[in-house]
Image (tube, grey):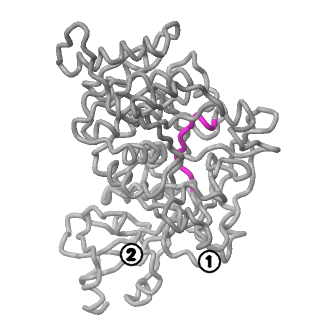
């Protein structure tokens, strides 16, 4: 190997050193690089991760050979080499002889679209959870298909159960979207690319990715796409909204441009939770929550809890969160210590509840309120239920010239205290999904600024996806976020 080629290598290591698998995948992804340095290819037998001799030298989670066979490229950068021509003999590796410098490049298994019939046949059945027009759940099997042009095939490793999944199942629809026959659920997913179609150059097999489920038209004739508000594109394909099948399956084909590569320090659960985080991140940005802003959050479900994480990260204080279930309020205080809570009593009117909520804000602010004076009120209320009575409570609780930001999804027609909102100049604003949030969400999670994985309360394997959705829908059981996984980390 030439000196020039050696200088281009971003990675050198001695036998026994750890190798960053992200860099390995980058190096392996370029055929031109392989040809330039004249790599020698050696086959590596199928690996059992529990008895993998390779692990005693390298800490590589990528060596979980579940799909086909891995191949290892060996670059020898110093002589004499300590490696025999066959690398299936562990005795040929000696960590103590550190004078030999080698680089190992681990290639993830690839379902080559040019020979897809042979490669894809080695994959497992593609399990998919469907909701039907009969309001039933069905776990079906199918054969995985090779990705088409511009598409990538992702092995979905984790998917979160959303309230909309439950609604599509129990009502065979949501708002204007109806299930005519059947539709795959799921849109909170993360996984690993195993094959790419023609023309794809932004992701490669082996990349860990988050799946952004909303794919707009991005035509120049679309006002919303052209102005950057692509979440409002009238012809958007949102995976899990009929007729577009969702991502709650083992293998999912997705437009490659809407896959976001993530750092290796993020788990698949965290990758899946980037979707609900994107919802509340978009809401936090639009509401302009900032340092010291008093914020009320109505509803301590999955979105309410993630909104609590965002509001806290943005510096809001004090924060009060409400719910009818005390267990959820206790969970919220555990997630973000210092959070104040108020349990809603359905027997009380929205105005009565709002009055008591404001007293909690006064207490949280450490402010003594004399008789006849108004209590402290939140400047911003993040409404996370979509329930009429909760929106009414939010309207009454919010300070004049404040903001009621509705994130929750509810009934088509609802009554609101119109004159109270009008005479107090309270802004009522709504949110529809998200746009341009994924890169920011990835940075927040990978850096540890927001810890989303702590909201997970239940986990089920893909084979029990039906039971997972039923569990998430069961109000008699405590649950915040249910995760469905395939090949647990």
Magenta span: 155-165
| Residue drawn where x is 61% and y is 67% of the image | 222
Name the residue nearer the viewer: 349 or 472: 349
Please, is residue 30 above or below residue 321 in the view? Answer: below
Residue 337 pos. (x, y %): 26, 26
Could you say whether the residue bearing mark 1 is in a helix, strand or loop?
A: loop
Please, is residue 70 above or below residue 214 in the view? Answer: below
Please, is residue 43 above or below residue 392 in the view? Answer: below
Q: Hey, which quadrant is residue 113 in on the image?
A: bottom right
Residue 156 visible, this angle: yes
Q: Is residue 163 magenta?
A: yes
Q: Residues within 10 Å of mark 1 (few under 14, many from 20)?
A: few
Residue 320 pos. (x, y %): 33, 24
| Residue drawn where x is 49% and y is 32% of the image | 481
Q: From the image, which quarter does the C terminus lie in?
A: top left
Q: Is residue 447 magenta?
A: no
Residue 242 pos. (x, y %): 72, 48
Question: Residue 198: which numbered mark, if any?
Answer: 1
Residue 50 visible, this angle: no
Q: From the image, which quarter does the N terminus lie in?
A: bottom left
| Residue drawn where x is 39% and y is 38% of the image | 453
Q: Of marks 2 and 1, which one's residue comes earlier in the chain?
A: 2
Question: Residue 27: which numbered mark, if any?
Answer: 2
CA gap between label 2 and label 1 equals: 20 Å
Q: Hey, which quadrant is residue 161 in on the image?
A: top right
Relative placement, left or right, of 260 versus 318 is right
């Amino acid at each position: 190997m030439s000196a020039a080629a050696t200088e281009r290598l971003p990675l050198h290591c001695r036998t026994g050193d750890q190798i960053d698998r992200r860099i390995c995948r980058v190096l392996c992804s370029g055929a031109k690089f392989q040809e330039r340095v004249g790599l020698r290819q050696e086959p590596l037998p199928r690996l059992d991760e529990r008895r993998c001799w390779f692990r005693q030298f390298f800490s590589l989670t990528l060596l979980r050979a579940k799909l086909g066979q891995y191949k290892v490229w060996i670059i020898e950068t110093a002589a004499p080499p300590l490696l025999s021509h066959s690398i299936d003999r562990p005795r040929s590796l000696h960590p103590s002889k550190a004078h030999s410098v080698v680089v190992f490049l681990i290639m993830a298994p690839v379902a080559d679209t040019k020979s897809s019939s042979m490669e894809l046949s080695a994959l497992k059945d593609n399990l998919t959870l469907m909701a039907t027009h009969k309001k039933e759940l069905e776990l079906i099997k199918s054969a995985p298909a090779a990705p088409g042009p511009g598409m990538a095939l992702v092995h979905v490793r984790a998917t979160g159960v959303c309230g909309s999944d439950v609604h599509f199942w129990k009502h065979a629809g949501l708002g204007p979207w109806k299930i005519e026959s059947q539709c795959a659920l799921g849109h909170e997913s993360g996984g690993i690319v195993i094959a790419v179609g023609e023309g794809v150059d932004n992701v490669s097999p082996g990349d860990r990715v988050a799946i952004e489920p909303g794919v707009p038209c991005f035509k120049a004739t679309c006002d919303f796409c052209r102005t950057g508000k692509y979440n409002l594109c009238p012809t958007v394909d949102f995976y899990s909204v009929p007729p577009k099948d969702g991502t709650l399956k083992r293998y999912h084909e997705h437009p490659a441009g809407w896959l976001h590569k993530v750092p290796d320090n993020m788990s698949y659960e965290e990758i899946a939770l980037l979707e609900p985080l994107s919802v509340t991140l978009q809401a936090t940005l639009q509401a302009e929550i900032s340092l010291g802003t008093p914020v009320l959050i109505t509803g301590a479900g999955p979105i309410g809890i993630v909104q609590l994480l965002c509001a806290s990260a943005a510096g809001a204080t004090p924060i009060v969160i409400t719910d009818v279930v005390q267990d959820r309020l206790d969970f919220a205080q555990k997630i973000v210590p210092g959070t104040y809570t108020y349990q809603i009593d359905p027997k009380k009117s929205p105005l009565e509840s709002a009055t008591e909520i404001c007293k909690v804000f006064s207490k949280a602010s450490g402010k003594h309120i004399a008789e006849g004076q108004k209590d402290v009120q939140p400047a911003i209320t993040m409404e996370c239920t979509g329930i009429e009575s909760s929106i009414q409570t939010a309207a009454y609780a919010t300070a004049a010239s404040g903001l009621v930001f509705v994130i929750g999804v509810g009934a088509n027609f609802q009554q609101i205290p119109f004159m109270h909102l009008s005479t107090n100049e309270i802004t009522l604003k709504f949110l529809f999904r998200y746009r341009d949030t994924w890169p920011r969400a990835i940075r927040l999670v990978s850096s540890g600024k927001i810890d989303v994985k702590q909201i997970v309360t239940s986990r089920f394997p893909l084979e029990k996806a039906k039971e997972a959705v039923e569990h998430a829908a069961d109000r008699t059981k405590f649950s915040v976020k249910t995760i469905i996984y395939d090949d647990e980390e």
